[in-house]
Image: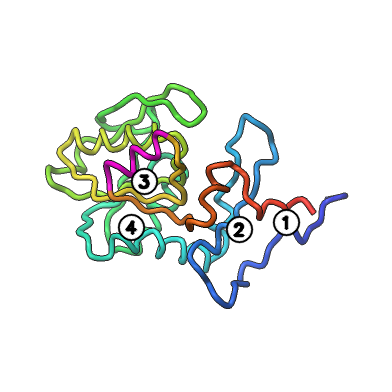
Amino acid sequence: MSGVNSSLVHFDLYKSPEKRTRGWYLSLMAPNEKGPNYAWLDPSRLYCHPQALQDCIEDLLQPFTNDQIDLVAGIDAMGFILGAAIASRLGKGFLAIRKAGHLCVTTYSHPYVDYSGREKNMEIRTDAIKPGVRILLVDQWIETGGTMRAATKLVEDQGGVVAGVATICIEDSEGGKWVRENYKSSDCVPDDLRSQFNGHFLESFHDFHK
């Protein structure tokens, strides 16, 4: 730990601001420290904070308060965290949408290109979605939109209805705009911070580099 300010590495898991405005917890997210082969930030740091996680879930669900949701589906892999937490909050079941090769049952699959430009396949079990089932799709982030587009295709090809899309951030990329235009969607980013997220640098990152 030599040369590292431990007060920046560890944070108070129980401290919250007196006034918890929408998205207050976004400043807990950590910047990329490992270079261009990784995502530009790590949202998972906010999951460690109990109040931040609960407020994130409540903010994501607010637009769907009066909507029918029968099942929550989370996208491999980080979407499993928020997806399972949201399913528990709603008292609904959770369906894992996985990268190809991990499910040992009969599956449907669909190709996609992820945010890094890599071609992959996504798969879903064939016995969980009946026609008309309304599914909330959850992922951690939408950058290019390729992953979410494949997930909607898998759900709809089985007759399911995408009731909505929920993710910490939907960037204003071509793919992000496609998601917003075609599905009811929710993210946690306030309007005054949107440009920082689209620019892939948050002012809060300065606190990590003092």
Q: Are marks 4 and 3 in contact (CB under 8 Å)?
A: yes
Q: Residues within 10 Å of mark 1 (few under 14, many from 20)?
A: few
Residues 82 and 114: in front is 114
Report how far apart the C-alphas of labels 1 and 4 lie in the structure: 33 Å
The reply, left or right, for residue 179 in relation to residue 56 is left
Q: Which mark is residue 207?
A: 1
Q: Position of residue 195 (x, y in %)?
A: 54, 47
Determine the residue located farthest toward the right in the rendered image.
2
Report how far apart the C-alphas of labels 3 and 2 lie in the structure: 24 Å
Magenta highlight: main SS:
helix
Rendered residue at 24%/49% (across/down): 135
Q: What segment is highlighted magenta in the picture?
A: 174-183
Residue corresponding to mark 4: 87
Q: Is 90 within the magenta? A: no
Report how far apart the C-alphas of labels 2 and 1 lie in the structure: 9 Å
Q: Helix or strand or loop: what does disc 2 sit on?
A: helix
Question: The residue under label 2 is which amino acid type?
Answer: Ser
Report how far apart the C-alphas of labels 4 and 3 lie in the structure: 9 Å
Q: Which mark is residue 27?
A: 2
Q: Helix or strand or loop: what does disc 3 sit on?
A: strand
Residue corresponding to mark 3: 74
Question: The residue under label 1 is which amino acid type?
Answer: Asp
Rendered residue at 17%/36% (across/down): 158
Q: Comparing marks 3 and 2, which lies closer to the viewer?
A: 2
Question: The residue under label 4 is which amino acid type?
Answer: Ala
Q: Residues within 10 Å of mark 3 (few under 14, many from 20)?
A: many
Q: Comparing marks 3 and 1, which lies closer to the viewer?
A: 1
Q: Residues within 10 Å of mark 2 (few under 14, many from 20)?
A: some
Q: Position of residue 197 (x, y in %)?
A: 54, 46
Q: Comparing marks 4 and 2, which lies closer to the viewer?
A: 2
